[in-house]
Image (cartoon, rainbow, N blue to C red):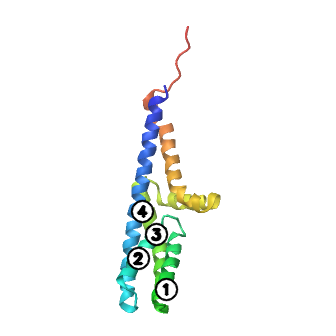
Amino acid sequence: RLFEPGLFMLKKTMDLFGNYLRGLVIENVILGVVAFLLLFILTIFTPLTIGLSLTIAVIIALTNVIRIVGPVIGGVVGMLLVLATSADFIALIGVFIIAMIVQLLDNAVVLPMVMQDQMDLHPVVSLLSILTGGIIAGILGMMLAIPFAGGVKVMYHIATVEMKKFNMEPDPPAL
Protein backbone atom coordinates (compact mmCIF):
# COMPACT_ATOMS: atom_id res chain seq x y z
CA ARG A 1 0.00 0.00 0.00
CA LEU A 2 2.91 2.35 0.62
CA PHE A 3 5.04 1.17 -2.33
CA GLU A 4 3.79 3.68 -4.91
CA PRO A 5 3.90 6.67 -2.53
CA GLY A 6 7.41 5.61 -1.49
CA LEU A 7 8.58 5.48 -5.12
CA PHE A 8 6.93 8.82 -5.77
CA MET A 9 8.73 10.33 -2.76
CA LEU A 10 12.06 8.84 -3.90
CA LYS A 11 11.60 10.25 -7.41
CA LYS A 12 10.77 13.73 -6.10
CA THR A 13 13.77 13.63 -3.76
CA MET A 14 16.11 12.55 -6.57
CA ASP A 15 14.73 15.30 -8.81
CA LEU A 16 15.36 17.80 -6.02
CA PHE A 17 18.95 16.60 -5.56
CA GLY A 18 19.56 16.83 -9.31
CA ASN A 19 18.19 20.38 -9.33
CA TYR A 20 20.46 21.27 -6.41
CA LEU A 21 23.55 19.95 -8.21
CA ARG A 22 22.55 21.79 -11.39
CA GLY A 23 22.06 24.99 -9.39
CA LEU A 24 25.44 24.52 -7.71
CA VAL A 25 27.17 24.17 -11.08
CA ILE A 26 25.36 27.22 -12.49
CA GLU A 27 26.23 29.26 -9.40
CA ASN A 28 29.92 28.30 -9.50
CA VAL A 29 30.21 29.00 -13.23
CA ILE A 30 28.66 32.45 -12.76
CA LEU A 31 31.00 33.25 -9.87
CA GLY A 32 34.03 31.91 -11.76
CA VAL A 33 33.25 34.10 -14.76
CA VAL A 34 32.69 37.18 -12.59
CA ALA A 35 35.90 36.53 -10.66
CA PHE A 36 37.86 36.05 -13.90
CA LEU A 37 36.48 39.25 -15.44
CA LEU A 38 37.39 41.25 -12.34
CA LEU A 39 40.83 39.63 -12.17
CA PHE A 40 41.30 40.30 -15.89
CA ILE A 41 40.74 43.99 -15.23
CA LEU A 42 43.31 43.72 -12.43
CA THR A 43 45.88 42.33 -14.88
CA ILE A 44 45.83 45.65 -16.71
CA PHE A 45 47.16 47.50 -13.65
CA THR A 46 49.37 44.84 -12.04
CA PRO A 47 51.90 42.23 -13.13
CA LEU A 48 49.28 39.47 -12.79
CA THR A 49 49.09 37.18 -15.81
CA ILE A 50 45.92 36.01 -17.49
CA GLY A 51 46.78 32.39 -16.65
CA LEU A 52 47.18 33.22 -12.97
CA SER A 53 43.92 35.19 -13.05
CA LEU A 54 42.13 32.18 -14.55
CA THR A 55 43.66 29.87 -11.93
CA ILE A 56 42.56 32.13 -9.07
CA ALA A 57 39.05 32.47 -10.54
CA VAL A 58 38.72 28.68 -10.81
CA ILE A 59 39.91 28.26 -7.22
CA ILE A 60 37.41 30.86 -5.99
CA ALA A 61 34.60 29.14 -7.92
CA LEU A 62 35.51 25.64 -6.69
CA THR A 63 35.83 26.65 -3.05
CA ASN A 64 32.41 28.29 -3.28
CA VAL A 65 30.91 24.86 -2.60
CA ILE A 66 31.65 25.66 1.05
CA ARG A 67 28.94 28.19 1.80
CA ILE A 68 29.67 31.64 3.18
CA VAL A 69 33.43 31.11 3.71
CA GLY A 70 34.31 29.36 0.44
CA PRO A 71 35.17 32.40 -1.69
CA VAL A 72 37.19 33.79 1.22
CA ILE A 73 39.23 30.57 1.33
CA GLY A 74 39.66 30.79 -2.45
CA GLY A 75 40.75 34.41 -2.11
CA VAL A 76 43.35 33.50 0.51
CA VAL A 77 44.71 30.75 -1.75
CA GLY A 78 44.74 33.28 -4.61
CA MET A 79 46.64 35.75 -2.47
CA LEU A 80 49.20 33.08 -1.66
CA LEU A 81 49.59 32.40 -5.39
CA VAL A 82 50.15 36.12 -6.01
CA LEU A 83 52.75 36.20 -3.24
CA ALA A 84 54.50 33.17 -4.72
CA THR A 85 54.63 34.55 -8.26
CA SER A 86 55.02 38.32 -8.14
CA ALA A 87 54.80 39.59 -4.54
CA ASP A 88 53.08 42.72 -5.86
CA PHE A 89 51.22 44.48 -3.04
CA ILE A 90 48.60 46.05 -5.31
CA ALA A 91 47.82 42.68 -6.91
CA LEU A 92 47.61 41.10 -3.46
CA ILE A 93 45.11 43.67 -2.21
CA GLY A 94 43.23 43.50 -5.53
CA VAL A 95 42.78 39.73 -5.26
CA PHE A 96 41.53 40.16 -1.69
CA ILE A 97 39.01 42.83 -2.70
CA ILE A 98 37.83 40.78 -5.69
CA ALA A 99 37.33 37.71 -3.47
CA MET A 100 35.21 39.81 -1.11
CA ILE A 101 33.17 41.24 -3.99
CA VAL A 102 32.55 37.74 -5.35
CA GLN A 103 31.57 36.51 -1.88
CA LEU A 104 29.11 39.37 -1.36
CA LEU A 105 27.70 38.94 -4.85
CA ASP A 106 27.22 35.22 -4.22
CA ASN A 107 25.49 35.62 -0.87
CA ALA A 108 23.29 38.55 -1.84
CA VAL A 109 22.38 37.86 -5.47
CA VAL A 110 23.60 34.69 -7.16
CA LEU A 111 22.83 32.04 -4.53
CA PRO A 112 19.27 33.21 -3.76
CA MET A 113 18.36 33.65 -7.43
CA VAL A 114 19.84 30.37 -8.64
CA MET A 115 18.38 28.33 -5.80
CA GLN A 116 15.00 29.99 -6.23
CA ASP A 117 15.05 28.94 -9.86
CA GLN A 118 16.43 25.41 -9.40
CA MET A 119 15.05 24.39 -6.00
CA ASP A 120 11.92 26.57 -5.89
CA LEU A 121 13.04 27.96 -2.53
CA HIS A 122 12.43 31.57 -1.59
CA PRO A 123 15.73 33.50 -1.39
CA VAL A 124 15.18 34.29 2.29
CA VAL A 125 14.63 30.59 3.01
CA SER A 126 17.92 29.80 1.24
CA LEU A 127 19.87 32.31 3.29
CA LEU A 128 18.18 31.43 6.59
CA SER A 129 18.71 27.71 6.02
CA ILE A 130 22.42 28.28 5.38
CA LEU A 131 22.76 30.36 8.54
CA THR A 132 20.80 27.81 10.58
CA GLY A 133 22.84 24.94 9.14
CA GLY A 134 26.03 26.80 10.06
CA ILE A 135 24.85 27.34 13.62
CA ILE A 136 23.78 23.72 14.06
CA ALA A 137 26.51 21.82 12.21
CA GLY A 138 29.21 24.28 11.11
CA ILE A 139 30.60 24.16 7.59
CA LEU A 140 29.02 20.78 6.83
CA GLY A 141 25.66 22.19 7.92
CA MET A 142 26.10 25.14 5.55
CA MET A 143 26.88 22.79 2.67
CA LEU A 144 23.84 20.58 3.33
CA ALA A 145 21.37 23.30 4.37
CA ILE A 146 19.79 24.03 1.00
CA PRO A 147 19.24 20.38 0.00
CA PHE A 148 17.80 19.75 3.48
CA ALA A 149 15.45 22.74 3.26
CA GLY A 150 14.36 21.65 -0.21
CA GLY A 151 13.82 18.10 1.05
CA VAL A 152 11.67 19.34 3.92
CA LYS A 153 9.63 21.39 1.46
CA VAL A 154 9.17 18.41 -0.87
CA MET A 155 8.21 16.06 1.98
CA TYR A 156 5.72 18.60 3.32
CA HIS A 157 4.20 19.05 -0.14
CA ILE A 158 3.96 15.31 -0.63
CA ALA A 159 2.42 14.73 2.81
CA THR A 160 -0.16 17.50 2.46
CA VAL A 161 -1.04 17.54 -1.25
CA GLU A 162 0.28 14.60 -3.25
CA MET A 163 -0.70 11.74 -0.89
CA LYS A 164 -4.37 12.47 -1.58
CA LYS A 165 -3.78 11.11 -5.09
CA PHE A 166 -2.84 7.69 -3.70
CA ASN A 167 -6.06 7.10 -1.73
CA MET A 168 -4.26 6.49 1.55
CA GLU A 169 -7.39 5.98 3.63
CA PRO A 170 -7.33 2.91 5.87
CA ASP A 171 -9.12 -0.22 4.73
CA PRO A 172 -12.58 -0.68 6.23
CA PRO A 173 -12.72 -3.31 8.99
CA ALA A 174 -13.75 -6.79 7.89
CA LEU A 175 -17.21 -7.92 8.92
Q: Which residue is mark 2?
A: 55
- Could you tell me the amino acid type at mark 1? Ala
Q: Point out residue 8 in the picture as x, y percentages from the top left corner.
A: 43, 36
> Could you say which disc has been placed on residue 84 in the image?
1
In terms of secondary structure, where does tag 1 sit? helix
Q: CA distance from mark 2 to mark 1?
A: 13 Å
Q: Point out residue 39 in the picture as x, y percentages from the top left corner.
A: 39, 82
Q: Is residue 47 left or right of residue 73?
A: left
Label whose residue precedes the other's in the sequence (1 or 4): 1
Q: Point out residue 57 in the picture as x, y percentages from the top left corner.
A: 41, 75
Quarter of the image with the C terminus in it: top right
In the rendered view, would you say 89 is above or below 78?
A: below
- Could you tell me the amino acid type at mark 2? Thr
Of 84 and 171, the residue lying toward us: 84
> Could you say which disc has been placed on residue 106 in the image?
3
Label whose residue precedes the other's in the sequence (3 or 2): 2
In the rendered view, would you say 146 is above or below 153?
A: below
Q: Is residue 49 left or right of residue 168?
A: left
Q: Which residue is mark 4?
A: 113
Callout 1 crowding tier (Cα within 10 Å): few <14, some 14–19, many ≥20: few
